[in-house]
Image (cartoon, helix red, strand yellow):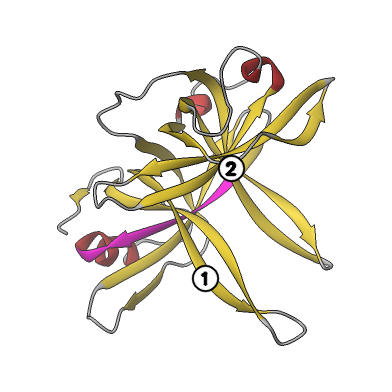
């Protein structure tokens, strides 16, 4: 195991449980469950984020609806087959849990990885600059997580100048975003996307802070 790679993906979330724990999968006889955590933003809005947690951690903490938990872990991805198509799924994998509600910043993520798709730069109708990147973050045992990230303002201009294969470190928060998608029957359905909203991005020689 490469212990350095364990430090390139760190998450701290504090929020309230919104759904009862639901069984997800089993690994080497240990069950893993998914809960949803409602995490506040400074803007008074909230993000509802998926958390994968082992039965051993669940047995030691109150994870009932309404309980407040602090999660320390990693933001991970996996592929799920839906209607014969592979869909990228994202979840916060809990490594440790505490019952706390006094965290000054309830949503922090730090990642280090490689840009694995060309950056996608655009502007909104209100002329706000946005750039999407997909970050490949190495994990132990030769695995990788593929994390969508979004940059704003001059951070967006900066990452738009980067190339596939460039290694960067980002800091920010995980956000949830609802969007509409047309189903095969022609009916619009609401889906939820998860991504990292970048507040700070660093390359080998350049450091940029968000100017928003």
Name the spot of residue 198 as percent of width and height, x first.
Answer: 32, 51
As helix, strand or loop, the secondary structure at mark 1 comes to: strand
Among the two numbered marks 2 and 1 on one chain, the one whose residue lies closer to the N terminus: 2
**Magenta-span inclusion, residue 146:** yes
Q: Which residue is mark 2?
A: 91
Residue at left 15%, top 57%? 211
Which circle, 2 or 1, is nearer the viewer? 1
In the rendered view, tell whether residue 82 sits above or below residue 49. below
Name the spot of residue 99 as percent of width and height, x first.
Answer: 45, 18
- Name the foreground residue: 85 vs 145: 85
Q: Which residue is mark 1?
A: 179
Left or right of residue 155, residue 131 in this image: right
Residue at left 84%, top 20%? 29
Q: Main secondary structure of the magenta part?
A: strand
Left or right of residue 27, residue 55 in this image: left
In the rendered view, tell whether residue 197 sits above or below residue 92. below
In the rendered view, tell whether residue 1 sits above or below residue 64. above
Q: Quadrant of the N terminus?
A: top right
Q: Quadrant of the C terminus?
A: bottom left
Left or right of residue 202, residue 211 in this image: left
Name the spot of residue 83 as percent of width and height, x first.
Answer: 82, 68
How many residues crowd mark 1 within 10 Å: few (<14), some (14–19), many (20+)? few
- Name the foreground residue: 168 vs 76: 76
As helix, strand or loop, the secondary structure at mark 2 comes to: strand
Q: Find the magenta span and give its range.
A: 145-153
- Name the foreground residue: 198 vs 108: 108
Name the spot of residue 64 as percent of width and height, x first.
Answer: 58, 28
**Magenta-span inclusion, residue 29:** no
- Name the foreground residue: 75 vs 203: 75
* Quadrant in which residue 28 is drawn: top right
How far apart are the two marked residues, 2 and 1, measured between alpha carbons?
A: 18 Å
Residue at left 50%, top 65%? 178
């Amino acid at each position: 195991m490469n212990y350095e790679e364990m430090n390139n993906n760190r998450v701290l979330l504090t929020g309230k449980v919104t759904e009862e724990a639901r069984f997800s999968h089993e690994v080497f006889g240990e069950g893993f469950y998914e809960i949803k955590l409602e995490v506040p933003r400074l803007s008074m809005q909230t993000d509802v984020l998926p958390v994968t947690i082992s039965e051993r951690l669940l047995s030691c903490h109150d994870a009932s609806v309404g309980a407040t938990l602090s999660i320390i872990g990693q933001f991970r991805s996996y592929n799920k087959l839906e209607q014969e198509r592979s869909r990228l799924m994202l979840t916060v994998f809990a490594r440790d849990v505490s019952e706390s509600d006094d965290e000054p910043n309830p949503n922090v993520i730090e990642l280090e990885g490689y840009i694995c798709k060309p950056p996608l730069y655009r502007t909104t109708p209100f002329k706000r600059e946005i750039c999407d990147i997909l970050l490949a973050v190495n994990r132990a045992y030769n695995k990788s997580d593929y994390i969508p990230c979004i940059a704003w303002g001059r951070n967006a201009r900066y990452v738009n100048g980067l190339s596939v294969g460039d290694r960067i470190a980002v800091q920010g928060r995980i956000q949830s975003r609802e969007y509409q998608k047309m189903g095969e029957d022609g009916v619009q359905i609401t889906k939820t996307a998860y991504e990292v909203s970048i507040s700070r991005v660093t390359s080998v020689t350049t450091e940029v802070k968000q100017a928003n």
